[in-house]
Image (cartoon, helix red, strand yellow):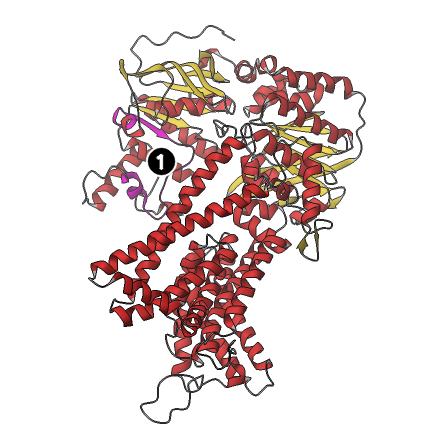
C-alpha cells in the first residue's frame, strides 16, 4: 500500500479546508484536518464513530464554526456561518437523518424553503422536479406523498432537494446505512453522474467497499486527525481498514492496556462454563428495514463475548431485545435453556439478564428522579422496598446509601436527582442497579463511553468481576481497544449481520479492520 | 437537607405572596381605570369571599370542583399525559351521578349517596379512560382526544335532560324546562353546618381527602413511583416492567374519575338537579389551578381556595361596585402570570445556587459525534 499522500490535482480545488480545528469541551473533534475536493471528483471520508467526520461536515455546512483553520471555495477564502450561506456558496448536503414533511408531496418537499415567491404553480414545480429526477435517474413521482415512500425513495427526495439548488459541492453523510444493496447501487450511479457534471462530491461512510467502488480519493480520519489521503486506485482495503482503527491500540489509555494485561494473564485461568445466552436465527425487522439478520451467537458462563461494530449496525436493537422491550421478528433467544423470545422485561430480568444500555440518559436512568429511586426502578415492587404497594422509605434510603458506598457513587445523598451527577457517577448508578441483582447474563453496551480514565477503569473491573463470578458477558462496543482488552471471543456486526465470530487470538486488527467496514472477502481469504 | 428544603418552601411561599399582592394591585389599577372606588372594590371582594358565613360557604363550594379538576389534571400530568378533558369528564361524571342518585334514592342513607358518588367517579373515569385507550391503542394524541371528547361529553349530558325517556323530569306543560327531577334529600351531599347561611357541603372534605390521597399515591406507593417514572422517562418505565398501555388507561381513568367527582359535587351539593350547561367552565379553570399549584396536591388545595374566593368575591364585586364580574377572570389570569413568572425566576436562581453547591458533580459534555 502506498503511504505517500496523493498530490492535489493541478486545477484549483473547488473547495478547500485547511488546518481545521474544532474543540468541544473535553474533545478535539477535529485536530488540524485538511480536505480538498476538485470539480468532478468524488472524495471519500473514512473513519470510525467519533473520528470527526460529522464535525467536519458540520463546519463545511456552516452548522459549526471552526476554532482554527480556513475554508476556501473556488480559491476564495470564505466564512460559512450558516447553512443558508453554505447553500448560497453552492454547498449542499444530503443528511443522514431526513428532514422531510411526510404530508407534503415530493415536489412540495423539494420546493420547501426555496419557494421564492408567495404564489407558485404546483404543476410547474412538479414538472421541474420530475424533469430533474429523470435527469439523475432518481425514479420518483413528484406528486406522490412523501409519507408513502420507502426509505430509499425518501433519500432520493433529499438528493433532489439538494440538486434543485444547483450546488457545486454535494456532501453525502452516511447515505448508505438505511439502504438495501440495489438502492446503494443506484445511489452510486447518481453520485457518478454528479461528478461527471463537474460537481465535487464528498462521501462520508464507514463502509470500505462502498468507498472503493465509487470514490476517486479516500481520506482517513482517526480521533479527529487526518491520517492520510490516497488515490482509490492505489490503496487496498485491508491497509485502509488498518489505518482507520490502526494505532488506536497503541494510543489507547494505559488503563485499558493494563486491563488487557490482566486479562491476558487470567485468560488461561478463568473457567468457561455452559452456554447461558443463545441466540438462534434472530431477525429483527423495523417495517421493511432489516435491523438484525439471522444472528447466531452463544455466550457461555464466565465468558466475555465482544460484539464489535460501528454503531447503528443493529446493536441498539440487540440491546432492546435483551431488555425485553423488543421481540424478534423470527428466531429464538434462550437464556439458560429457557426461550425468552416472547417474554416481557420482567421475565428477562427474572432470568438474570442485566443490561447496561448504550444511552444512560435515554434508557438507563430517570434523570428527574433521585439516585435512590434510580437504584430500585426494576425492583420497587419487591420487598423490602415496598410492602402491599406502599414504599418503604427507610429501606430505600438504606439500600441507596449501601450501593452508593459499594459502587463509589459520588453524590450528596440518595435523594440527589440523578440529573445533577457527572457522567461517571451516573454510570456507576446504572452499574450498581444492574450488578446488585442476580446476574446470569450481563449485556454491557458502550459501558465506558464518555467517561474519564478513573471511571473507565472501574467499569472495566466491574465487568471482569461479573465474568469471574460466572456471568455470561456480552460486551457491545464500537471501541476496538475495549473489545480486544476484555473479550474471550469477538463477534463483528455489520448491517445487522454477524460477519464473523473469532477466538481471542484470531481477533487481530488485520482481521477486524476490514470486517468492521463490512469487507468480508479479505477476511475469509486470510483464514 | 431539611433545612435547605424548609428554606426553599419559605422562599416559594414568600414569592407566591408577593405575586398575589402584585396581582391584587393590578386589579386595583383596573378598577381605578373604571373610575370606581378601589377601596370599595377590594372590600367587596373580601366580603364576598370571606366576610360572612355565607361568603365563606360560597368560597369553599366554588373551590371544590376546581380542586377535583386540578387533581385530575396533575395526576395525568405526572404520567406525562396532558388531559384537557376535565370539562367533558365533569359532565359525564355528574350526569352518571345524578342518574344513580335518582335510581337509588329509595335506599337507606347513606347507601344511595355513596352509589351516586361511585357512579360519578366511574362515569368521568370511563370518559377519561376512553381517551387513554385511544392513546394507548391508536396513538391518538391525548390532548386532542380529551379536548374533542369534551364536546361529546357535554352533548351527551345535555341530551339526557332533553329526553323524557332518560333523565328529564315529566313534562307537565309546554313551559317545563329541560331538567332532571329534584334530587331527594338522602342522596344530596349533606351541609356541614346545619341551619346556617354557610352552605358549605361535604364536597370540600371529599376534595381535600382526594388531594391527600393523590399525594400519597404519587409519593408513597409503587403505583405512584411507576406513574412518575412513566412521566419522566417512558422508555425506562417500559424497561422496568411497566405496561405502558395499561398504565396510560388506568391513569386516565383515575384522572377522569376525579374530574367526574367535580361535576358530582356541584350537582349533588349545590344544584340538586341536572340542567343543561350546568358548569361555568370548572373543567378548564381547574387546569389553571393545577398550573398555579405547579402540579403539587398541596398547592392545588391552596390555589383552589384562592380561585374559589375570587369567584365568590367576584359575585359581590359586580353587585356592590358595578364592575363586570369578568374582571375576576382578568385577575385570575394576572395571578397565574405573576406566579408563573416568579416561579420561573426562583427556579432559575435556586438552580444556579445548587450548581455551585454540587460543584464537581456537574454534567459531562455530551458525547460529540455520537452518530458519526
- Above-or-below relation of A184 to B8: above
> According to the image, label 1 marks what residue?
A158
- Above-or-below relation of B52 to B285: below
Q: Quadrant of residue A298?
A: top right
- Above-or-below relation of A364 to B124: above
Looking at the picture, tell me which residue is in the foreground, A119 or B228: B228
- Magenta stretch containing residue A212, yes or no? no
Q: Position of residue A175 (x, y in %)?
A: 43, 30
Looking at the picture, tell me which residue is in the foreground, A430 or A38: A430
Left-right relation of A302 to A393: right
Left-right relation of A407 to A223: right
Q: Which residues are magenta?
A: A86-112
Q: Position of residue B246 (x, y in %)?
A: 58, 58
Left-right relation of A485 to B273: right
Left-right relation of A454 to A40: right
Say what secondary structure mark 1 lies in. Answer: helix
- Residue A78 appears in view: yes
Mark 1 surroundings within 10 Å by alpha-carbon count, few (fewer than 14), some (14 through 19), many (20 or more): many
Looking at the picture, tell me which residue is in the foreground, A372 or B80: A372
| Residue sitting at the far top | A4
| Residue sitting at the far bottom | B172
Q: Chain under label 1?
A: A
- Magenta stretch containing residue A97, yes or no? yes
Amino acid at each position: 500500500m502506498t503511504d505517500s499522500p496523493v498530490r492535489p490535482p493541478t486545477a484549483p480545488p473547488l473547495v478547500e479546508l485547511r488546518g481545521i480545528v474544532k474543540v468541544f469541551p473535553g474533545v478535539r473533534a477535529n485536530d488540524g484536518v485538511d480536505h480538498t475536493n476538485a470539480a468532478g471528483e468524488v472524495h471519500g471520508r473514512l473513519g470510525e464513530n467519533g473520528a470527526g467526520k460529522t464535525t467536519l461536515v458540520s463546519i463545511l455546512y456552516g452548522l459549526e464554526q471552526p476554532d482554527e483553520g480556513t475554508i476556501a471555495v473556488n480559491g476564495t477564502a470564505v466564512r460559512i456561518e450558516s447553512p443558508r450561506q453554505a447553500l448560497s456558496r453552492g454547498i449542499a448536503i444530503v443528511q443522514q437523518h431526513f428532514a422531510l414533511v411526510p404530508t407534503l408531496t415530493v415536489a412540495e418537499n423539494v420546493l420547501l424553503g426555496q419557494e421564492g415567491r408567495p404564489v407558485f404553480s404546483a404543476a410547474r414545480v412538479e414538472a421541474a422536479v420530475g424533469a430533474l429526477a429523470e435527469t439523475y435517474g432518481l425514479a420518483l413521482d413528484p406528486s406522490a406523498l412523501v409519507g408513502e415512500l420507502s426509505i430509499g425513495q425518501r433519500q432520493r427526495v433529499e438528493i433532489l432537494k439538494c440538486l434543485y439548488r444547483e450546488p457545486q459541492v454535494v456532501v453525502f453523510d452516511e447515505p448508505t446505512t438505511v439502504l438495501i444493496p440495489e438502492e446503494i447501487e443506484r445511489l452510486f450511479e447518481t453520485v457518478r453522474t454528479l461528478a461527471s457534471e463537474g460537481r465535487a462530491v464528498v462521501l462520508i461512510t464507514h463502509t470500505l467497499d462502498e468507498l472503493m467502488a465509487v470514490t476517486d480519493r479516500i481520506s482517513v480520519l482517526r480521533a479527529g486527525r487526518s491520517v492520510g489521503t490516497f488515490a482509490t486506485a492505489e490503496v487496498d482495503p485491508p491497509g485502509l481498514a488498518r489505518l482507520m482503527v490502526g494505532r488506536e491500540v497503541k494510543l489507547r489509555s494505559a488503563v485499558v492496556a493494563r486491563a488487557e494485561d490482566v486479562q491476558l494473564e487470567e485468560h488461561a485461568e478463568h473457567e468457561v462454563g455452559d452456554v447461558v445466552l443463545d441466540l438462534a436465527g434472530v431477525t429483527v425487522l423495523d417495517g421493511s428495514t432489516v435491523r438484525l439478520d439471522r444472528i447466531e451467537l452463544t455466550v457461555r458462563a464466565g465468558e466475555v463475548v465482544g460484539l464489535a461494530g460501528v454503531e447503528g449496525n443493529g446493536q441498539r436493537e440487540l440491546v432492546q431485545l435483551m431488555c425485553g422491550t423488543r421481540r424478534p421478528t423470527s428466531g429464538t433467544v434462550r437464556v439458560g435453556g429457557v426461550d425468552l423470545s416472547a417474554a416481557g422485561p420482567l421475565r428477562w430480568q427474572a432470568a438474570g439478564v442485566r443490561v447496561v444500555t448504550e444511552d444512560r440518559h435515554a434508557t438507563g436512568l430517570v434523570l428527574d428522579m433521585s439516585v435512590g429511586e434510580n437504584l430500585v426502578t426494576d425492583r420497587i415492587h419487591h420487598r423490602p422496598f415496598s410492602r402491599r404497594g406502599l414504599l418503604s422509605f427507610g429501606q430505600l434510603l438504606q439500600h441507596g446509601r449501601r450501593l452508593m458506598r459499594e459502587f463509589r457513587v459520588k453524590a450528596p445523598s440518595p435523594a440527589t436527582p440523578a440529573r445533577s451527577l457527572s457522567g461517571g457517577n451516573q454510570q456507576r448508578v446504572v452499574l450498581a442497579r444492574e450488578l446488585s441483582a442476580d446476574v446470569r447474563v450481563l449485556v454491557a453496551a458502550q459501558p465506558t463511553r464518555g467517561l474519564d480514565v478513573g471511571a473507565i477503569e472501574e467499569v472495566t473491573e466491574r465487568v471482569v468481576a461479573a465474568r469471574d463470578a460466572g456471568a455470561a458477558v456480552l460486551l457491545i462496543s464500537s471501541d476496538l481497544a475495549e473489545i480486544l482488552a476484555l473479550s474471550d471471543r469477538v463477534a463483528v456486526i455489520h448491517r445487522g449481520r454477524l460477519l464473523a465470530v473469532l477466538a481471542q487470538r484470531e481477533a487481530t486488527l488485520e482481521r477486524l479492520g476490514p470486517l468492521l467496514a463490512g469487507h468480508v472477502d479479505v477476511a475469509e481469504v486470510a483464514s | 437537607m431539611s433545612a435547605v428544603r424548609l428554606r426553599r418552601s419559605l422562599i416559594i411561599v414568600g414569592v407566591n405572596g408577593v405575586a398575589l399582592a402584585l396581582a391584587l394591585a393590578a386589579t386595583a389599577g383596573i378598577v381605578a381605570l373604571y373610575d370606581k372606588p378601589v377601596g370599595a372594590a377590594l372590600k367587596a371582594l373580601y366580603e364576598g369571599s370571606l366576610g360572612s358565613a355565607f361568603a365563606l360557604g360560597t368560597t369553599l363550594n366554588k373551590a371544590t370542583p376546581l380542586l377535583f379538576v386540578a387533581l385530575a389534571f396533575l395526576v395525568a400530568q405526572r404520567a406525562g399525559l396532558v388531559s384537557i378533558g376535565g370539562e367533558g369528564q365533569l359532565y359525564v361524571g355528574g350526569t352518571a351521578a345524578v342518574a344513580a342518585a335518582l335510581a337509588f334514592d329509595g335506599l337507606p342513607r347513606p347507601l344511595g349517596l355513596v352509589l351516586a358518588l361511585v357512579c360519578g367517579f366511574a362515569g368521568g373515569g370511563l370518559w377519561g379512560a376512553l381517551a387513554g385507550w385511544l392513546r394507548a391503542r391508536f396513538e391518538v394524541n391525548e390532548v386532542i382526544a380529551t379536548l374533542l371528547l369534551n364536546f361529546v361529553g357535554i352533548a351527551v349530558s345535555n341530551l339526557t335532560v332533553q329526553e323524557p325517556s332518560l333523565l328529564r323530569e315529566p313534562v307537565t306543560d309546554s313551559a317545563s324546562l329541560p331538567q332532571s327531577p329534584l334530587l331527594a334529600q338522602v342522596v344530596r351531599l349533606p351541609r356541614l353546618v346545619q341551619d346556617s347561611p354557610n352552605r358549605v357541603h361535604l364536597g370540600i372534605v371529599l376534595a381535600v381527602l382526594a388531594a391527600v390521597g393523590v399525594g400519597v399515591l404519587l409519593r408513597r406507593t409503587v403505583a405512584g413511583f411507576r406513574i412518575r417514572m412513566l412521566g419522566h422517562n417512558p422508555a425506562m418505565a417500559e424497561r422496568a416492567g411497566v405496561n405502558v398501555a395499561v398504565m396510560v388507561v388506568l391513569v386516565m381513568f383515575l384522572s377522569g374519575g376525579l374530574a367526574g367527582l367535580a361535576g358530582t359535587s356541584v350537582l349533588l351539593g349545590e344544584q340538586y338537579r341536572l340542567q343543561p350547561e350546568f358548569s361555568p367552565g370548572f373543567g378548564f379553570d381547574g387546569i389553571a389551578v393545577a398550573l398555579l399549584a405547579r402540579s403539587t396536591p398541596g398547592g392545588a388545595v391552596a390555589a383552589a381556595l384562592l380561585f374559589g374566593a375570587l369567584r365568590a368575591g367576584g359575585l359581590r364585586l359586580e353587585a356592590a361596585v358595578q364592575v363586570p364580574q369578568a374582571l375576576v377572570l382578568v385577575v385570575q389570569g394576572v395571578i397565574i402570570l405573576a406566579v408563573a413568572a416568579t416561579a420561573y425566576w426562583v427556579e432559575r436562581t435556586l438552580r444556579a445556587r445548587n450548581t455551585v453547591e454540587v460543584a464537581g458533580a456537574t454534567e459531562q459534555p455530551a458525547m460529540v459525534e455520537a452518530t458519526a
